Amino acid sequence: MKLSKIGVITLLLFGIVISFTGIVCGDPGVPAKSETQVISTETIADVVGTVMDTDAVTWSTTTGGIPISGDDPILANYPFWASSPFGSYQEFKDIWDHDSQIWTGVHLQDLWNYIINNPDKYSDQYLVWAKNFKNWAQNQGDLNNRILYDGEVRYSTSYDANIVAQAGHTVFTKTLNVDTQNKVIGQSNIKANTEATYIATGDGGHILGSENIMIDGAGNPTNASDRMLCPFGADQGNVIPAFCNIVQAGSKYDLTVGSVVTGADDRFIGTDATVPVILNYAIAVKPYTVTGQGTSLAMGSTSAYVKAHIQESRDFNITLIAPGGEHSPVPGTGDPTKAEDLTYTESSSASGLISSFSKTIAYQSGKALLP
């Protein structure tokens, strides 16, 4: 096909920016595991003929969460019972189950906090045990468990992309990075960038592509003081409320000529809940240009979409009855009540001779410091 300036029969101009922002409360993210991994790939191709590229990532992780009773295999498997003040798991269970004991009414998820926050009532041996037990218990989430334990936060993310170009000239660059380390603002756990230019050189030539990214987070109420770097943040709400949020975004295109640029990334691994969970997606379809040979408008069809379902609680402060009938703050416990339910869907498409098509989607949700 000889490049030339083509008379515009159909001209579609699209420029859309969508942003979801969690202002007060939302996804706290999860901290990295003790062992982290990085996977990076880069693909560069300049081909007359056929090009195929397929990517697929699925990732699930969890943190925190222990059952509310003392009769559970996770607690039984605690490796340090012999060095604890109780001497054994059975002794701990007997004390916990006895209605007249001091911990009556105190939620097991926050037993350690109760001991740590009342050092005048307990010996150093109990304080050391409580701190060790807290560190251990906060990493006991179970991906194989169908329901969330108290205090558990669980995330899943996925990314997939497929490109097939045939009977044409394709210039293609793709980078994909997966990093399970803790991230801060400006960094990503999954990040993909794609650039492709294509022009058909034979009958039936076209480039067909699709791309999708998803993040799905759910969590029971958790202690804000454990998840916020700022020492003043938890003063305005000692609990990060329960949530259940899922966001999906992606695009498709089928072109006989044109240039496509896409970017996708998300972040949900980090130690500070004030660093928001994010998902970003962008696509731009542009004319095909070769220096000195002319420009051809993109020809074909393209579309992009976003779907979101946001469910949030508003349990900022939850108080249980402590020993002696006192009201003592024991955050992160109790049954969450759904206070927000937001569903959002949008799709955009263009077909024909395309001068410009672009769509940018940005989602973020996190525990914010209230004014």
Image (tube, grey):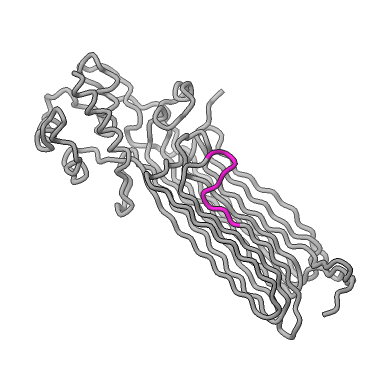
Q: Residue at x 32, y 41 (%)?
A: 139
Image vertical order of residue 40 relative to residue 44, above or below: above
Highlighted magenta segment, given as a residue range: 184-192
Residue pictured at 53% horizontal, 27% vertical: 369
Query: Residue 58, image x and y in percent?
Result: 45, 59
> In the displayed structure, does residue 3 sit left or right of residue 193?
right
Rendered image quadrant of residue 140: top left
Q: Quadrant of residue 301?
A: bottom right
Tell me: 220 left or right of 18.
left
Quadrant of the image containing the C terminus: top right
Residue at image position (10%, 37%) is 90
- Find out whether residue 109 is within the magenta segment: no
Asked if residue 135 lies left or right of residue 291, the reply is left
Q: Position of residue 297 (x, y in %)?
A: 82, 68
Q: Residue 176's spot in the image, x, y percent?
A: 56, 58
Residues 51 and 308: in front is 51
Considering only vertical position in the picture, is 34 above or below 258?
above
Q: Which part of the image, by quadrant, shows the N terminus?
A: bottom right
* Identity of the residue drawn at 77% across and 71% down: 299
In the rendered image, residue 185 lying in the magenta stretch gets the answer yes
Give the quarter of the image for residue 345: bottom right
Say if 103 sits above or below 297 in the image. Answer: above
